[in-house]
Image (cartoon, rainbow, N blue to C red):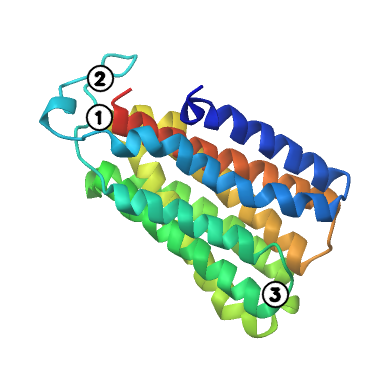
Amino acid sequence: MNFRKIAAPYYLIVLLIHCTFLWLEWTLASKFTKPLLMPLLLIYLYSALKAPFNVQTLEPKTDPDGNPLSTRPISKSIVILAFAASWAGDLFLMFEGKGLFIAGMVSFMTAHISYCYLFNQIQPFRRKNALYPFLLGAFVYHLGTDIMHVIRPNLGDLLIPVYLYMFVITAMAIFAFMTMAVKDTEYWGKYFFALGAAFFVFSDMMLALNIFGSKDPFLGFLVMATYGIAQYLIAKGFSSYLLRS
């Protein structure tokens, strides 16, 4: 049995088990499932990452609507960095403490910056196509400021780092939405990257409320469910893009 081929179903099963543990408030058990998530996605991405993205694999292809698909290469090492940084963030945020929280936030900022770089490689920024991505980004930023208004009294000296994180994830969302704004990458943007970014934004907003607002088991469940879906969609997008499928 080729484990790489079933890594994605295993990921979804582990995610479901992990979210169930959170729902039941089995905190100790959840600490065994959470560290498995990102490694499973990296195993899933292995075939796509090792496939040569050269002239032979850059033959013109079309999406289900008949639109020619982009043939721009992307950095595979940055793909690995993004999910490795996410894994580090998962590990840091498993435990309480301001230092660990900051380390987790820096890890996820690294992941988001990596995603920005990769999305921009897939669909370079074009001013003429930027209106809708920026409008959607403005909406994300507006939602973020609403959350900040609620949690600000509890942030203390974390106020500036949390604001900085909000700027970074908003930028990630804008770059993801940009892949949806142009025909040659609309397929990946619409079905994977933009949707994944939206789930990621929602997850982080719920995480902020859960950490700095009222701790609620349901919020913890919601955070991980949406985060897990977000990373799965983004990983599926990169796999589809690299394998031209």
Q: Which residue is mark 2?
A: 67
The disc labelled 1 sits on which kind of residue? Asp
Q: Of the two numbered discs 2 and 1 on the same chain, state the one appearing first in sequence.
A: 2
Residue 21 is situated, as x and y percent measured from the top left of the image, at: 81, 44
What's the mark number on residue 4? none
Q: Residue furthest left?
A: 55
Q: Are marks 2 and 3 in contact (CB under 8 Å)?
A: no
The kind of secondary structure element at disc 2 is loop
Q: How many marks?
A: 3
Q: Is residue 8 left or right of residue 135?
A: right
The disc labelled 3 sits on which kind of residue? Arg
81 up-or-down from 161: above or below? above
Between tags 2 and 3, which lies in front?
Answer: 2
Q: Is residue 134 in sight in this rendering? A: no
The kind of secondary structure element at disc 3 is helix
Q: Which residue is mark 1?
A: 184
165 up-or-down from 183: above or below? below
Q: Residue furthest bottom?
A: 157
Residue drawn at (69%, 83%) of the image: 156
Residue drawn at (25%, 18%) of the image: 62
Q: Is residue 119 left or right of residue 153?
A: left
Q: Are marks 2 and 1 in contact (CB under 8 Å)?
A: yes
Q: Around disc 3, counting alpha carbons within 10 Å, would you say few (fewer than 14), some (14 to 19), or many (20 or more)?
A: some
225 up-or-down from 116: above or below? above
Q: Is residue 143 in sight in this rendering? A: yes
Rendered image quadrant of residue 161: bottom right
Residue 36 is situated, as x and y percent measured from the top left of the image, at: 62, 46
Q: Which residue is mark 3?
A: 152
Q: Is residue 73 left or right of residue 28?
A: left
Q: Is residue 173 left or right of residue 222?
A: left
The disc labelled 2 sits on which kind of residue? Asn
